[in-house]
Image: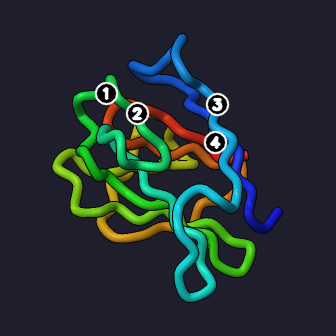
Amino acid sequence: MEGELVLMIMSGVEDGNERHYELVQGDGIWESGSWILTLGRHERNDIMIRYDSFISRFHGELILTNGKWTYKDLNSTNGSFYEDPTDFFNDIRFDGSISIAPRQLFRVGRTWICIG
């Protein structure tokens, strides 16, 4: 739904802590018709993953445009990854942006994330 996001921490150092985020239109910013949510260790992020030291202070952005989600890595130190659908043990690092489908796993630092 436009203006809502359910994000789940699937595994990583945040296990047992905040594992479920429900974000609404008032979170993040709206810019040129896109909803932008920041993700990282710093408290100014919309999605803060505090205890994963492999996540940069401002690691990436989740962007909703025309009902489709994109994840953009913000030149983080340790990068961002998505799951290789042909080989679960082979994460693929990417620079820049990738499309994120509902229930698709992606990883920042040591934390696997899924959007609902």
Image marks 1 and 2: residues in contact by CB distance under 8 Å = yes
Q: Quadrant location of residue 33? A: bottom right
Whole-percent x, y for residue 112 in the image: 49, 34
Residue under pointer 1? 52
Residue under pointer 4? 7
Q: Earlier in the sequence, mark 4 or mark 1?
A: 4
Whole-percent x, y for residue 5 in the image: 70, 52
Whole-percent x, y for residue 13 in the image: 39, 19
Q: Earlier in the sequence, mark 3 or mark 2?
A: 3
Identify the residue at horizontal 28%, vertical 39% (top origin).
55
The answer to whether 7 is drawn above or below residue 28 in the figure is above
> Which three-letter amino acid code belongs to the residue tagged 1?
Asp
Spatial CA span between label 3 and label 1? 16 Å
Residue at the outermost left position: 77
Q: Earlier in the sequence, mark 3 or mark 4?
A: 4
Spatial CA span between label 4 and label 1? 17 Å
Spatial CA span between label 1 and label 2? 6 Å
Residue at the outermost right position: 1
> Which three-letter amino acid code belongs to the residue tagged 4?
Leu
Image marks 3 and 4: residues in contact by CB distance under 8 Å = yes
Identify the residue at horizontal 34%, vertical 61% (top origin).
73
The answer to whether 48 is drawn above or below residue 64 in the figure is above
Spatial CA span between label 3 and label 4? 6 Å
> Which three-letter amino acid code belongs to the residue tagged 2?
Ile
Residue under pointer 3? 20
Give the secondary structure at mark 2. loop
Residue nearest the observer in this picture, 49 or 100: 49
Whole-percent x, y for residue 103 in the image: 70, 46
Residue nearest the observer in this picture, 38 or 53: 38
Q: Determine which of the numbered discs, if any, sits on residue 49 in the image.
A: 2
